């Protein structure tokens, strides 16, 4: 713990008589009561904490399966991200941009390197307060960013599922930063709202400042050093109910780009002259995430999974809505997969079983094929179904023998006599891909098929009134229609016997 924070903590500890469970080192006492710290990195070790962060590498933007989409991360960025350009020392994370030759056997040659860190698949949050204290060197073509992307793009690809930029800086104009949200629809039909903040009296991003947002279901507010400078409320995701897309879990990203449309030379290139005296640094003192204890804001329930479109030699449009996906088909093409609706890259484990359920109807009688496939196109579900104007409901169980990434595909191309039916519309509704749980085992509070310390902890939290969900039938070991300390004692006995 850094010295200044340590004394602040001691003061709070003394004032409360030692009865303090968490402490926000900034803000008023009222704010500290409102916001509860739920995740942080104070960067007090000797290395980047890989239990919290992952490196995002390279220069190419890739799809869910690692296939090339575009270079420059979609922004004409010139750097190659490595895992060698970030370090933790003296309580500070330093991301260093360097002017150096770097050759990757797949992605080619680059003149700049840097690092990009994210919490994807390790931590994400919906709402609350996110706070980062940082500073960054200046220089034309530098682009420091503190931002957030959706953990699961439940409303579709960028930017239908949203993006939150807590802070972005221009290396050429370090006297200002901006806060932005991206939303609306799939690129290029997306839009954004942004506002600049200007530092006073010669101050700049080269000095230490605290950047934060407060995020609720009907607003996002941006602050610099606790000074409010922007509030946005008017966003949307096409064919979805407000407050989509900013009603789901988002993860954090820290990076320092070189070049690109934001501050690059001619909107592309890095300025090599700024590196005459060595590397440029983006430094972060801490990242803290708080929940708003006075808010009931949680991720909205998704009524129907969004589908990603793939078209080959066909003429059709796909529209995702709150409870369904619609296909308006003019020409089915020549292949069974000429028209696809896909739930891509679902990570599954050996022994797990999932259920795919949906309703489907068509304005023309025709056939469709539903599959679950791995990246080598091996099929674990392969069903041909006859479609009519009546909504039919289907549910299929799929069990996996190996760890893999699975794609769920609705194939609506040239199947059977589909090429003869002319223009038509297909609606797939209430699409769900859900892992089957193995409930029923006495003491198995988290439904993972075993009784372990994890169940003991979860059950203990339930007794303290802090757990969100516990299966009552599994925890009522004495079958007296309640769970209490006697059930806890019996569960402890089961754990001891089994471990």
Image: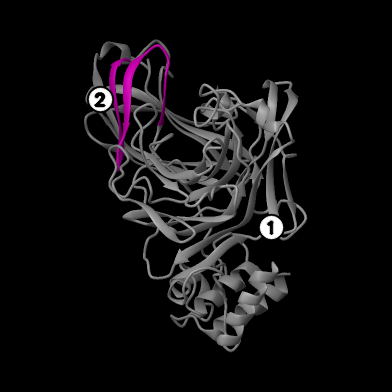
Decide which of 186, 314 is in the foreground and name it.
Answer: 186
Magenta residues?
308-331
Q: CA distance from mark 2 to mark 1?
A: 54 Å
- Which residue in the structure is indicated by mark 2? 425
What predominant SS class does the magenta segment belong to?
A: strand
The picture places residue 116, in percent across and down from the top left corner, at 63, 40
The answer to whether one can see residue 1 in this image is: no
Q: Which disc, if any, is residue 257?
A: none
Name the image quarter holding the C terminus.
bottom right
The picture places residue 494, in percent across and down from the top left corner, at 65, 75
**Residue farthest toward the bottom in the current orientation of the protein:** 17
The picture places residue 252, in percent across and down from the top left corner, at 54, 48
Q: Is residue 272 left or right of residue 434?
A: right
Decide which of 344, 227 is in the foreground and name it.
Answer: 227
Q: Looking at the image, what colour scheme do you see?
A: one colour
Q: Is residue 125 left or right of residue 334?
A: right
Of mark 2 and mark 1, the one earlier in the sequence is 1
Q: Residues within 10 Å of mark 2 (few under 14, many from 20)?
A: some
**Residue farthest toward the front in the current orientation of the protein:** 201
Name the image quarter holding the N terminus.
bottom right
Q: Identify the residue shown where x is 54% and y is 77%.
A: 477
Query: Residue 137 falls in which quadrant of the image?
Result: top right
The answer to whether one can see residue 47 in this image is: yes
Number of marks present in the image shown: 2
Q: Identify the residue shown where x is 54% and y is 70%.
A: 24
- Which residue in the structure is indicated by mark 1? 43
**Residue farthest toward the right in the current orientation of the protein:** 46
Q: Relative to residue 145, is residue 219 depicted above or below?
A: below
Q: Residues within 10 Å of mark 1 (few under 14, many from 20)?
A: many
């Amino acid at each position: 713990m850094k010295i200044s924070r340590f004394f602040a903590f001691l003061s709070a500890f003394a004032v409360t008589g030692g009865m303090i469970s968490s402490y926000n080192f900034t803000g008023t006492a009222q704010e500290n009561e409102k916001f509860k710290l739920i995740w942080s990195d104070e960067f007090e070790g000797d290395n980047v904490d890989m239990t919290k962060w992952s490196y995002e590498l390279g220069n190419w933007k890739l799809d869910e399966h690692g296939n090339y989409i575009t270079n420059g991360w979609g922004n004409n960025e010139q750097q190659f991200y490595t895992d060698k350009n970030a370090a933790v020392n003296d309580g500070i994370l330093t991301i260093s941009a360097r002017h150096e030759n770097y050759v990757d056997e797949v992605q080619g040659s680059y003149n700049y390197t840097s690092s990009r860190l994210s919490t994807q698949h390790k931590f994400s949050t919906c709402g609350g307060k996110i706070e980062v204290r940082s500073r960054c060197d200046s220089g034309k073509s530098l682009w420091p960013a503190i931002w957030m992307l959706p953990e699961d793009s439940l409303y579709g690809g960028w930017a239908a599922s949203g993006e939150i930029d807590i802070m972005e800086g221009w290396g050429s104009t370090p006297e200002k930063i901006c806060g932005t949200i991206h939303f609306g629809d799939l690129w290029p039909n997306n839009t954004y709202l942004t506002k600049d903040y200007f530092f006073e009296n010669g101050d700049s991003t080269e000095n230490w400042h605290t950047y934060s947002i407060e995020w609720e279901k009907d607003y996002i507010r941006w602050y610099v050093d606790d000074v409010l400078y922007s509030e946005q409320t008017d966003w949307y995701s096409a064919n979805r109910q407000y407050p989509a897309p900013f009603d789901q879990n988002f993860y954090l990203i820290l990076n320092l780009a070189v070049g690109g449309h934001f501050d690059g030379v001619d909107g592309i290139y890095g300025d090599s002259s700024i590196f005459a005296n060595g590397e440029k640094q983006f430094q972060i003192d801490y990242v803290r995430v708080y929940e708003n204890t006075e808010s009931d804001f949680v991720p909205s329930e998704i009524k129907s999974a969004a589908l990603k479109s793939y078209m080959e030699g066909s003429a059709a449009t796909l529209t995702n809505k709150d409870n369904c996906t619609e296909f308006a088909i003019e020409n089915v093409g020549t292949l069974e997969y000429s028209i696809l609706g896909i739930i891509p890259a679902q990570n599954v484990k050996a022994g797990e079983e999932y259920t795919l359920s949906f309703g489907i109807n068509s304005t023309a009688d025709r056939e469709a094929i539903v599959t679950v496939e791995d990246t080598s196109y091996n099929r674990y579900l392969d069903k041909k179904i006859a479609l009519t104007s009546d909504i039919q409901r289907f549910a299929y169980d799929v069990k996996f023998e190996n760890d893999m990434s699975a794609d769920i595909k609705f194939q609506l191309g040239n199947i059977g006599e589909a090429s003869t039916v002319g223009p038509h519309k297909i609606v797939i509704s209430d699409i769900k891909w859900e892992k089957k749980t193995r409930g029923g085992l006495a003491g198995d509070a988290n439904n993972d098929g075993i009784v372990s310390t994890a169940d003991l902890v979860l059950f203990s939290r339930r007794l303290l009134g802090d757990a969100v969900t516990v299966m009552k039938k599994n925890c009522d070991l004495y079958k007296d229609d309640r769970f209490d300390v006697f059930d806890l004692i019996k569960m402890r006995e089961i754990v001891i016997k089994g471990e």
